[in-house]
Image (cartoon, rainbow, N blue to C red):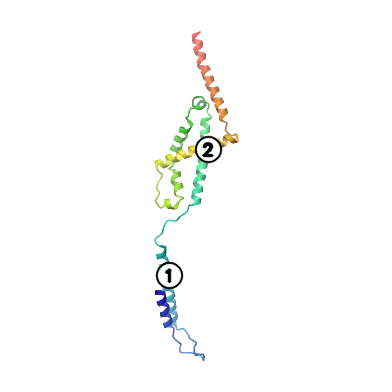
Amino acid sequence: MSATLLLTAFLLSVTPGHAQTAVSDSVTLSAESARALQTALGDVQRTLESQAEDTSGPSSPRTGMDRTQVINVLFLVLALSLVFESAMSVLFDWRLFIRYFEGRGVKTPLIITVAFLVFLNYDLDIVAELLRGFPEIQAQNIGRPTLPGQLLTALLIAGGSGGVFRIFTRLGIRSPEERDRKARNERASMKKGTEKPSSDADS
């Protein structure tokens, strides 16, 4: 409605010039008419912009998924799983660990504990980082890393480390059978070592 009124005012402001040519229907624009035209066009533009803002309403959260964020988080999970599997294998291949702890359910709690302490020290919460990739959840103002999120992250990395170990086993990089054989040999040698002094004492 306001745009129509402005255009009507512009048409009314157009007047024939004093110096008309032989053609009777020719019309010239005065300087005042040109300025009125510019003002009218500016008002129309501002009116259209305000109507567009009213239609769109307040800034609403985006929908969808930030694929870059999600892919980065998944790549981080894979990288940390590889790092933890490679780092913990040094401990798991240790002769004393094989002798006393191999096959006794110690590895998983140990990986979870080490991962939780590392993430606690570096304030890393992969769960929160993953949730930030979804704008609907990001609108809830996800803050700093939390202890439940870091514990869940440690469990996630422990599961990923187990998956990496299974992949390495299929590729022949890791051999659970070889480790079990080493554990049996170490425990057998330890038994023999304890039985020999007792037999010497009896003799």
Q: Is 122 or 107 nearer to us in this picture?
A: 107
Give residue 190's position: percent from left, percent from top: 52, 20
For the N terminus, the quadrant is bottom left
Could you tell me the amino acid type at mark 1? Leu
Identified at 50% across, 45% down, the residue is: 74
Residue receiving disc 2: 163
In the rendered image, the residue lying farthest to the right is: 172
Q: Secondary structure at mark 2?
A: helix
> What's the amino acid at mark 2?
Gly
Residue sticking out furthest to the top: 203
Q: Residue 169 in the image: state x and y as whole percent.
A: 57, 34
> Element at badge 1?
helix
Task: Name the residue beneath numbered marker 1.
Answer: 48
Q: How far is the residue under mark 2 from the one under mark 1?
A: 58 Å
Picture coordinates of residue 107, whole percent (x, y): 48, 31
Left or right, 60 with reference to 93: left
- N-terminal of the pair, mark 2 or mark 1, is 1
Query: Residue at coordinates 41% horizontally, 65% vertically from top-left?
Result: 55
Q: Residue at x 49, y 38 (%)?
A: 159
Against 129, is 169 above or below?
above
Rendered location of residue 69, percent (x, y): 49, 50
Whether residue 174 is situated above or below residue 54 in the rendered picture:
above
In the depicted view, which residue is nearer to us: 127 or 113?
Answer: 127
Establish if 2 lies above or below 83.
below
